[in-house]
Image (cartoon, rainbow, N blue to C red):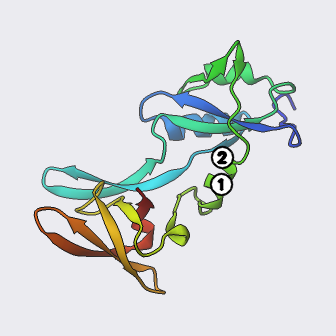
Amino acid sequence: MPFETGKTDARWYVVATRPAREALAAQQLENQSFEVFLPKRKATIRHARKLITKTAPLFPGYVFVRMCVDTVRWQSINGTMGVKFILMQDERPIALPKGFVESLQGFSDAEGFVSYAPQLKVGDTVTLMSGPFAKQVGELISMDDRGRVEVLMRFVSSIAVKTSQDNLIPA
């Protein structure tokens, strides 16, 4: 197979995508037999006085591809629908540090949604990812065994917000 990835020497590389085309690029690269990882998160968008929660890439404008550049025809990546280019230096793709993507995958579920919940502890500074306080920073003040948390938000005065662990990332 022309795109066979040599699993032993394979490394992860960053592919820049066209705006809002991460999923298209990932699908097209998978169709070419590349191993692709597109980490996702839940994002809350405010639109016309409504809050809409949708799926968004954790790193907008980028996907990760695992391959062995010495044995794979990686140049075809740049001509793939949804892709701008693979990040390169000196006419060669730049490999990510070993363990970076693997650690992201460790925090991901089967669908690629990243959750840092198991790593959080009371007292941590966290960012809410969705809901009316999306993108706001607060302090984690309590957690229960069902995945519910309480975050102290400091605006003009302090208020406690209840949400789920999956709605938080470390700040």
Crowding near pointer 2: few (<14 within 10 Å), some, many (20+)? few
Camera-side residue of 56 and 117 = 117
> Residue 117 at what x, y percent from top left?
50, 69
Which type of secondary structure does the marked residue at label 2 adopt?
helix
Residue that numbered label 2 is attached to? 100
Q: Residue furthest left?
A: 156
**Residue sitting at x 26%, y 74%:** 161
Which type of secondary structure does the marked residue at label 1 adopt?
helix
Q: Residue furthest top?
A: 90
Say above or below: 77 vs 163: above
> Residue 19 at what x, y percent from top left?
42, 30
In the image, 115: left or right of 37?
left
Res 14 → quadrant: top right
CB atoms at circles 2 and 1 under 8 Å apart? yes
In the image, 24: left or right of 88?
left
Quarter of the picture containing the N terminus is: top right
**Residue sitting at x 70%, y 12%:** 90
The residues bearing labels 2 and 1 have C-alpha atoms spaced at a distance of 5 Å
Does residue 110 appear anywhere in the picture?
A: yes
**Residue sitting at x 27%, y 71%:** 152
Crowding near pointer 1: few (<14 within 10 Å), some, many (20+)? few
Quarter of the picture containing the C terminus is: bottom left
Amino acid type assigned to the residue bearing label 2 in the image: Phe
**Residue sitting at x 15%, y 62%:** 155
